[in-house]
Image (cartoon, rainbow, N blue to C red):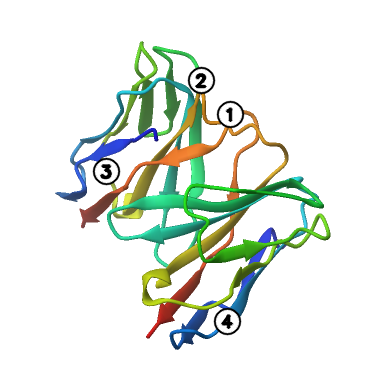
């Protein structure tokens, strides 16, 4: 099993450009989520989905869009990149929406720099 | 917003030493998880604790959930260079709809 696959691994954008961070999982997990990791701030939830066709906002959703057309894929879109979005982005999935009984499986991250 | 504070933020020790990392909050959590993250990779779950006062052991790692379910600790006995990494605690709030709140992390370096 590949687990959670994120692409690209690295990306540099100019301010105002748009891009999509890809995330795919092959574990048939219903729950998927996007986090950003910044130094000294831990992981912060951007958006999440409890199943195909259902998405919701997390702690820091502004500037990001998501969609969930299939169980396997959960892309994250930056419509107009800003330097404040420079970060490492992690996609995670789990079997269910209850962390205590269904641990998160993380991808290896996308390191994004916005100049 | 529920906050989880980890201490220390950085820890550098010699192989064979013992250490404890703390995760504290003023909020009550339904459960608490500890993850370990290595450079260039995503976090990997080490343990989940769900009951106040619960103690779990994973080889040389001992995890404890506070009686009031507001804090947790991770103790490593006889640390080894392979223990080097970023340790993250994450709490599932009672009122946050099962979403996890992550601490800032403790960067542990074990020198040979």
B15 in relation to B92, above or below: below
Cα gap from disc 4 to disc 1, whole angstroms: 36 Å
Cα gap from disc 4 to disc 2, whole angstroms: 41 Å
The N terminus of chain A sits in image quarter: bottom right
- Which residue is label 2 attached to? B50
Label 1: few (<14), some or many (≥20) within 10 Å? many
Q: Nearer the viewer, residue A28 or B108?
A: A28
- Which residue is label 3 attached to? B79
* Front disc: 4 or 1: 4
User: Which image quadrant is residue A75 in?
Assistant: bottom right
Residues indicated by labels 4 and 3 sit on the same polypeptide chain: no
Q: Nearer the viewer, residue A40 or A25?
A: A40
Left or right: where A57 falls relative to B76: right
Label 2: few (<14), some or many (≥20) within 10 Å? some
- Which residue is label 4 attached to? A18
Q: Are marks 2 and 1 in contact (CB under 8 Å)?
A: yes
């Amino acid at each position: 099993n590949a687990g959670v696959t994120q692409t690209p691994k690295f990306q540099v954008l100019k301010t105002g450009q748009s891009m999509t961070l890809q995330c795919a999982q092959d574990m048939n997990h219903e729950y998927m989520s996007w986090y950003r990791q910044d130094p000294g701030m831990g992981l912060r939830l951007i958006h999440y989905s409890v199943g195909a066709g259902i998405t919701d906002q997390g702690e820091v959703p502004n500037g990001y869009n998501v969609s969930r057309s299939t169980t396997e894929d959960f892309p994250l879109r930056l419509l107009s990149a800003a330097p404040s979005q420079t970060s490492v982005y992690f996609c995670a999935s789990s079997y269910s929406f209850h962390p205590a009984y269904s641990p998160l499986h993380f991808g290896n991250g996308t390191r994004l720099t916005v100049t | 917003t529920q906050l989880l504070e980890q201490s220390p933020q950085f820890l550098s020790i010699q192989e064979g030493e013992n250490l404890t990392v703390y995760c504290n909050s003023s909020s009550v959590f339904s459960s608490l998880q500890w993850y370990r993250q290595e450079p260039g990779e995503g976090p990997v779950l080490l343990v989940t604790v769900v009951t106040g006062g619960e103690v779990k052991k994973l080889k040389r790692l001992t995890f404890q959930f506070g009686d009031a379910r507001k804090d947790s600790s991770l103790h490593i006995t006889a640390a080894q260079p392979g223990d080097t990494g970023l340790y993250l605690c994450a709490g599932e709030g009672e009122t946050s709809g099962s979403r996890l709140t992550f601490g800032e992390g403790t960067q542990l370096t074990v020198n040979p």
